[in-house]
Amino acid sequence: MCELYSKQDTLALRRKHIGPSCKVFFAADPIKIVRAQRQYMFDEKGEQYLDCINNVAHVGHCHPEVVQAAQRQMELLNTNSRFLHDNVVEYAKRLSATLPDKLSVCYFTNSGSEANDLALRLARQFRGHQDVITLDHAYHGHLSSLIEISPYKFRKGKDVKKEFVHVAPAPDIYRGKYREDHADPASAYASEVKKIIDEAHNSGRKIAAFIAESMQSCGGQIIPPAGYFQKVAEYVHGAGGVFIADEVQYGGNPVSSAVGLAVLDVIENEDLQGNATRVGNYLTELLNKQKAKHTLIGDVRGVGLFIGIDLVKDHQKRTPATAEAQHIIYKMKEKRVLLSADGPHRNVLKIKPPMCFTEEDAKFMVDHLDGILTGLEEAIGDKTESVITENIPCRAKMSDEAHLESLSDGILDPKENPSSKRNGLCTDKHSLLSKRLKT
């Protein structure tokens, strides 16, 4: 494949022409991906990487049926939806058939941010109220209206919480206010939402909507306890508000609709939902065995192929192992496995591969993770909390560009500073871990 630029030239042009807040994975040593197929990605040297990051490519990268559907329609027509076209209505019909009966009307947009912005506008227009309840650590998009309701975003920058925004605790039963030993964490967390509703009404405000991801992603793969959303919906509807379920949505022209139809066909024909369940259960089983083996793993949680591995320095205090998580994702990259770290403390390894991920892929990933965890725990003497006295990236030693990228995707960018570059970990005289790593 002919490339326009070398990897270094591409990186230099990116730094010159692309805003520094636009994140790049593995900022200390970015990968130049030139093609992808199914669950694999390939760099400019032809090196193959197992993709455990890009769940948006639901049926895998460049599935031939999806590519052909796009090509066929591109040759005929590609314009917006203000004309009649079979693809648009057929896709709306097929998509709504996968949802509960009452959810039968579609508004196609070009991004998840547009979809959530539209949902907010509909909710506010429907009820005539402005106030929104959101969950702590939530991320709902990059538009101004969504940054306002995304604690994940507005707490990092110069923005402050608006008066009409109410933040409820994330329903986290591992590290949150009500944990797995609570008799009824679903009711307890839902009661926090009810309390917010009552306090808002007592101060003369009314709730337009409650918005939440079905499973928090940037928040650290948080799975709400069973029954939580049902109780919250009851409280919100009782207060006259609507419940907004934040899911990624796409497109609205014949080409994107043709692609959407092809994706639905592939999901059905290849039983990818069933595959996600089967392989996800197998992967979770493998990871739970690793949890029993490695003290760094505090929790494994997920649904299907969307899984989080919560890394901790100690199990009692559940202190986030942030630096260790960064070390692991870089070491996994060296093994040609692409992972990311997320969560409020950037200590949760995030697994969200395409739905065509196989049991062989799962074992390949876990085997490498096992080896890296073993080496890491041997290097720190299995006493991470006493060895690493500082679990915060050396931001003072990082360039502004690297700092922005680390805020965006939790990846350190040590550049060439010898005091901050070794195996992706902050290294000074107080950090013995990175000086002892031999893996």
Image: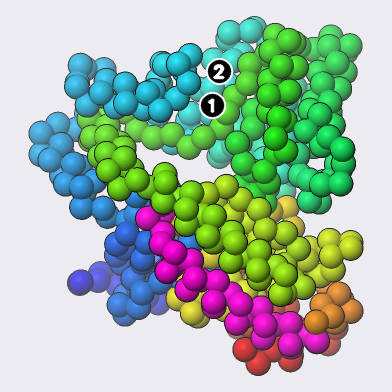
Which residue is located at x 72 percent, y 30 percent? 228
Q: Is residue 81 magenta?
A: no
Residue 119 rendering spot, x and y as whole percentages: 54, 22
- The answer to whether residue 167 is left or right of residue 34 is right
Q: Is residue 381 above or below residue 314?
A: below
Asked where in the image residue 366 lies, by quadrant, the reply is bottom right
Q: Give amino acid for label 1.
A: Asp
Q: Position of residue 254 (x, y in %)?
A: 22, 30
Provide the secondary structure element on which disc 1 rests: helix
Q: Nearer the viewer, residue 370 or 216?
A: 370
Viewport quadrant of the C terminus: bottom right
x and y percent of residue 357 in the render?
A: 41, 59
What residue is disc 2 on? 121
Q: Is residue 354 above or below residue 189?
A: below
Between 119 and 10, the one lying in front of the other is 119
| Residues packed near mark 2 inside 10 Å, few (<14), some (14 to 19) or many (20 plus) | some
214 lies above or below 339: above
- Image quadrant assignment for residue 73: top left
Query: Is residue 370 in view from this perspective?
Result: yes
Crowd tier of the residue under label 1, counting other residues whose Cα lies within 10 Å: few below 14, some 14–19, many 20 or above: some
Kindly indicate whether the residue at mark 2 contacts the one at mark 1 (C-beta within 8 angstroms). Answer: yes
Tell me where the magenta segment starts and ends, as one range. Answer: 354-381
Q: Amino acid at mark 2?
A: Arg
